[in-house]
Image: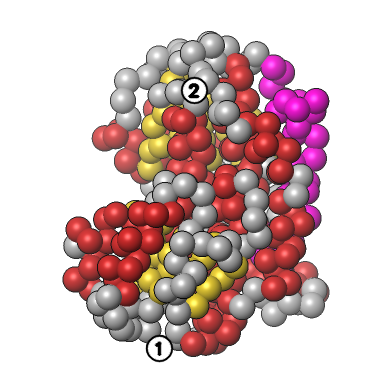
Amino acid sequence: DAGKGEYDHYMLKEINSQPTALSNTIEGRIEDGEVAFEELPAGSFADVETVQFVACGTSYHAAMYSGQLLRAAGIPTEVLRASEYEATSGPVDENTLVVAVTQSGETADTLDAVRTATARGARSLAVTNVVGSTAAREADDAIYIRAGPEVGVAATKTYSSQAVTLALLTQRLAADVPTATPADDRDAMLETLADLPEHVETVLETTTAEQLAEETLDSTSYFFIGSRLGHSVALEGALKFKEITYEHAEGFASGELKHGPLALVTDETPVIAVLTGSGVEKTKTNAIEANSRGAPIIAVGPDDNPLADVADAKLSVPETHPVWAGLLANVQLQLLSYHAADLLERPIDKPRNLAKSVTVE
Ligand code: G6P
């Protein structure tokens, strides 16, 4: 298939195209040290008091990531699974911004959640990859992530581009919303974003994920753990792994491992620990707990991470701002999933029972 170029699968092509996709995502989004969305001039969010993210699957994990940044800026924020919107949404009004995070812009659960929120008076914003999609057309405003077309059912480059776009959106909201407090390290965060495509390139060139996938292939289950920003990265790592390998994988908040899942831990259940950003000490403590029950530890993070001396294996990411480091860890986890699925000869681009876009509720 010419569309795959030199790659065996679209998924691998899309993983490898992330430096380019991210460069497109970032292009023009920071001007004179401020976040710029040509679609929404500065001050557009001055009336916003609360924010709700609604999303499914991988997009939900990107929403979780940015939801945390928004809460840190003092903006009351809910991150809701679109399919459970009715049961989980707090009150909304015209000062609520509901952000639909949907790569395709066509996911029925997400569209339904936005329709419910807007019927209750909320203002809506679609963050999507597809120009002219239903979400983009129906929402009051739309921001495009500009990742380029994604063919593989398992989302990869669109996750990275969503997470970056949403992180920028959070900084923009923090600037516009009168009651918000922009992060102390906001300038460093925005300045270091320009290096992200190059850091992803480094990960792609130096990764040991294929070897590690081979070494761990006989495992019974794979547990992904992370804390704070690393929590959503762990959830996304586990989702990707189960989607394409058909192996049992679960993601947990690091501190939750001891509240149940630890009963499943043996020497055949690798614990993949996301060690980027804050929360790494909690991840360390809980990973060591699993390790003392025999679980091999795979440390995903910078080389000087707190598990460096204990881990059985590592997946390295370059040093950068903590907000971007989590996205580099995610690229390593994408590669781990891909290589495990490839060794197991799974139909990587079209996993059984899954669809790129689910248009039924
Ligand atoms: C499907 C796909 C997932 C995706 C989810 C949300 O379930 O298999 O990979 O994350 O839909 O898709 P969206 O287009 O709304 O981001």
Q: Which mark is residue 231?
A: none
Tell me: 188 left or right of 166.
right
How far from the left and from the top, in percent, is residue 103? 59, 47
Tell me: 21 left or right of 63.
right
Up the image or down, 311 lies above or below 174; here it is: below
> Residue under circle 2?
97
Labels in figure, total: 2
Judging depth in this view, the residue of 5 and 179 nearest the camera is 179
Q: Quadrant of residue 204?
A: bottom right
The structure residue drawn at horizontal position 69% and vertical position 17%, both measured from the top left corner, is: 42
Q: Is residue 168 visible?
A: yes
The residue type indicated by label 2 comes to Leu
The structure residue drawn at horizontal position 53% and vertical position 81%, both measured from the top left corner, is: 212
How far from the left and from the top, in percent, is residue 196? 71, 51
Mark 2 and ligand 1: say if the CB distance to the nearest ligand atom is below 8 Å: no
The structure residue drawn at horizontal position 62% and vertical position 62%, both measured from the top left corner, is: 317
Rate crowding at label 2 as few (under 14), some (14 to 19) or many (20 or more) other CA atoms within 10 Å: many
Up the image or down, 353 lies above or below 169; here it is: below
Earlier in the chain: of badge 2 and badge 1, it is: 2
Which circle, 2 or 1, is nearer the viewer?
1
> Residue under circle 1?
218
How far from the left and from the top, in percent, is residue 33? 75, 27
Residue 30 on the magenta span: yes
Q: What's drawn in magenta, residue-wise?
A: 14-42
Q: Quadrant of residue 332?
A: bottom right
Rate crowding at label 1 as few (under 14), some (14 to 19) or many (20 or more) other CA atoms within 10 Å: few
The residue type indicated by label 1 comes to Asp
Say whether marks 2 and 1 touch (CB < 8 Å).
Answer: no
Q: Is residue 158 visible?
A: no
Up the image or down, 350 lies above or below 19; here it is: below
Residue 206 on the magenta span: no
Q: SS of the residue at dot 1?
A: loop
